[in-house]
Image (tube, rainbow, N blue to C red):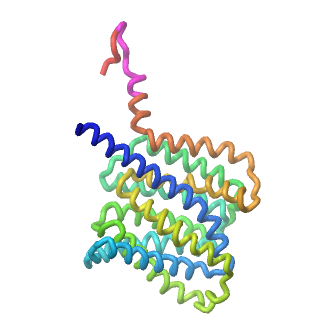
Amino acid sequence: MPTFFNAQAGNRRVWAIAIALLLVYIVWGTTYFAIGIAVQTMPPLLMNAIRFLCAGAIMLAVALWQGHALPTATQWRNSAVVGGCMVFLAMNLMGFAQKMGIGSGLMATVVTTMPMWLALWSRWGGERVPVTSWIGLALGVVGALLLALEGDFSATWLGALLAFGAPLCWSIGSYASRRLSLPAPAMASAAQWFTGGAMGLVVALCFEPVSALGQVSARSWAAWVYLLFFGTLVALNAYLWLLQNTSAALAGSYSFVNPAVALFVGVALGGELLTGWVYAALPLIGAALVFILYGKALSALWARRGAPVPPGGAPVR
C-alpha cells in the first residue's frame, strides 16, 4: 500500500512538472507577439513597471487570502535581490538593447544562453549537472540559433552588451531564488514582482512621461492585460515553481523552446512565412528536450549497452 501511494504521489509530481513546462513553453512563446503589440503605443519601461507592480499587488492579495504572513526583513531583502535581477535588470536591459538597435535574431539567440549560465551557477554552487543536460543545452542553443537566422542580426556594441546582460541577470536571479531564504511561493512572487516593479518605475519615470499612457491604444492595452495575467501571473509563477522543483537545465529549457512557439504564432497570427531553417532547427530542439528530460534513462541505456556480456550470461555490472 505505501508503494501505491508513493507511485500516486510520483505521478502527480510528473503531471505537475509537465503542466508547468507546457505553460512556460506555450505562454512565454506567445508573449513575443503580445509585447510587439503592446509597445506599438505603450512606453516599454512603464509597460514593464506597471505590469509587475500590478502583478505583485494581485499576488500579495492572494497570499494574504491564503493566510501567508508578510515577508520578514531578510525575506524582503532576498526578494529584492531576485526581483531586481529578473524583473528590473533583465527585462529592462532587453528593452534598452532593442532601443539601441540590436536585431531580433541576435536577441533571440542571446536569450538562449540563459540556461547555460544557470547550469553553470548551479554547478559552482555544488549541484551536479549531468553531462546529458549540458549536451541538451548545447543542442538547444544551436537549434534556436538556426531559428534566429531568419531574424535580424544587426546590433550596436552597446546594444549587444546590454543584450548579453539580460540573460545573465535573469540566470543570477533564477539561481538566487533556488538558494536564498524566501517566503511561501505566492508571497515570494508578490515580493519579487513588487520590488522589481518598483525599481523599474523609478527608472521609467526618469525616461518616459506618464502622460504617454493616455495615448495607448485599446489593442496595446489588451496585449498588456494578456502579459499581466498569462505572461506573469500564470507562466512566471509556473517558472518560479519549476526552479524549486526541477533541475536548472529543465527549468531553463524554455529559452530555446519559446522561439519555436513564437515562430508558429507569427505564422498563424502575423502572416509570417517559414524558411528551410525551421526544419533543421526543430529536430535539434526536440533532441535537446530528450537529453534534458530523459538524461538519466539515456545514461543508463548507454551503460548497459557498453557493459560486456559473457557467453550465455547477463551483462557484467
Compared across the picture, whether 131 is left or right of 204 comes to left
Residue at the spot 52% in from the left edge and 46% down from the top edge: 138
| Res 36 quadrant in image | bottom right
Q: Which portion, as a residue range, is magenta?
A: 302-312
Q: Is residue 260 above or below residue 220?
A: above
Whether residue 151 appears in this view of the structure is yes
Who's the residue at 36% across and 52% down the image?
A: 123
Image location of residue 182, percent across then percent down: 30, 68
Coordinates of residue 148 in the picture (x, y in percent): 66, 55
Image quarter of residue 29? bottom right
In this rendering, the answer to whether 173 lies above or below 8 is below
Residue 170 vertical placement versus 245 (above, below): below
The image quadrant where one finds the N terminus is: top left
Q: Residue furthest left?
A: 2
The reply to whether the magenta stretch includes residue 96 is no
Rendered position, 256 above or below 156: above
Does residue 154 appear left or right of residue 294 in this picture?
A: right
